[in-house]
Amino acid sequence: MERKKVTIPDLQNKKREGKKITMLTAYDYPMARLVDDAGIDMVLVGDSLGMVVLGYESTVPVTMDEMIHHSKAVRRGTKYAFLVGDMPFMSYQVSKEEAVRNAGRFMKEAGCDAVKLEGADEVLDATIAIINAGIPVLGHIGLTPQTISKLGGFKIQGKTAKAAKNLIEQALKLERAGCFGIVLECVPDLVAKLITEKLSIPTISCGGGVYCDGQVLVTNDMVGLFDRFVPKFVKQYIKLSPLILDAFKKYKDDVERKVFPDKEHSFTIKEEELKKIKIK
Ligand code: KIV
C-alpha cells in the first residue's frame, strides 16, 4: 500500500478504531530518517534535546533558536510522520502574543505540523491563542519536566484520588481548548485509562501505561544513547553506547598501530605519474 503523510484525522481514526499510535523523538536528520523509515506515526522534536543531545542538566535552558535549528534538520529527514515541535520553557508563558509568535516559528521556519506545550490551567490562554492562529497543539500533563522544581522533582503524578481528579479535569480543559491530543507523562496506568476513556482525542503515554491511545519514548533513551539515567518506564531495545565506544577504541588502536588506513581505504596514483612529479 502506498504510504501517505500522517494527518490529525489519521490519528483520531486510530483512536476510534482502537489502533495504537506510535511516536518517538528525533533531534537530527539521520535519526529522523530512521524513525520515519520504521513507519512511526509521529515524530517529536522534544526539548529533551537539552538533556540527551546538548548536555544540559534539565530542559529549562533550551532556547527557541536551538529548537528551531534541530527541528529544521528533523523536518528534512521526516517524510511521512506527523512532526511536532516542543515549545521550550518561557517561549509561551510570558504572553499569548509571544506564544503565538514562537509557535508560528515552528511552523514557518522549521516546517512542523504542530507544537506541544506543557501544562493546562496556567497555559490555557496561550494554548487557545495558538490554536486560534491555526496551529495544532498537543497538550502535555502529568510530569512536566519544564516545571520540575515546582513539582519537587521527577515524581509520578496523579497518585492520590485528589491529584488524579485534578489530572482528569486538566485533560478535559485541554480537550475543550481544542488540543488534538495529550501526552500523559509519569501517570499511574489506571488513571491514564480513565483519562483515555473520557476523552475523544488521543492520549499518548510517556510512562502512562498500556491503556493510552499511543506511546512516546525519548529515542536516545530507548536505543541506549543516553546513560545518565534511564527512567523506569523506558524499555531499551538496544544499547548503542557500548557498541559505539568499542568502535571508537578499535579506530584509535588501528590508527596508532598504523593498520588504518590500509590500501582498501586509500587512493592510489599510477607509478608512471608519480615518477613525473618533480619537487624542487
Ligand atoms: O521533550 C520530550 O522529549 C518530551 C517527551 C518525553 C514527551 O516531552
Image: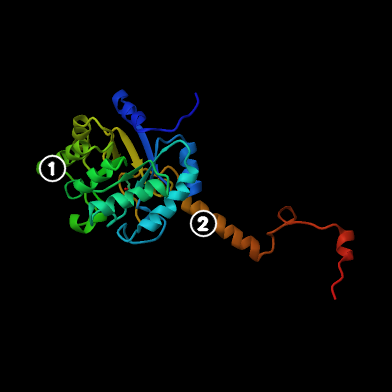
Identified at 31% across, 25% down, the residue is: 18
Residue 190 got which mark?
A: none
Identified at 42% across, 45% down, the residue is: 111
Q: Amino acid at mark 2?
A: Leu
In which quarter of the view is residue 276 placed?
A: bottom right
**70 to the left or right of 140:** right
Residue 208, percent from left and from top? 26, 40
Up/down of 29 relative to 274, above or below: above
How many marks can you see? 2
Residue 58, percent from left and from top? 31, 59
Question: In front: 175, or 226?
Answer: 175
Q: CA distance from mark 2 to mark 1?
A: 45 Å
Identified at 87% across, 60% down, the residue is: 273
Residue at the left extreme, as displayed: 162
In which quarter of the view is residue 13 placed?
A: top left
Identified at 18% across, 57% down, the residue is: 150
What secondary structure is found at the residue carrying circle 1?
A: helix
Up/down of 165 relative to 260, above or below: above
The residue singled out by tag 2 in the image is 245
Residue at the bottom extreme, as displayed: 280
Up/down of 153 relative to 35, above or below: below
**4 to the left or right of 63:** right
Q: Determine if residue 183 is in view.
A: no
Residue 166 got which mark?
A: 1
Question: In front: 160, or 117?
Answer: 117
Q: Determine if residue 74 is in view.
A: yes
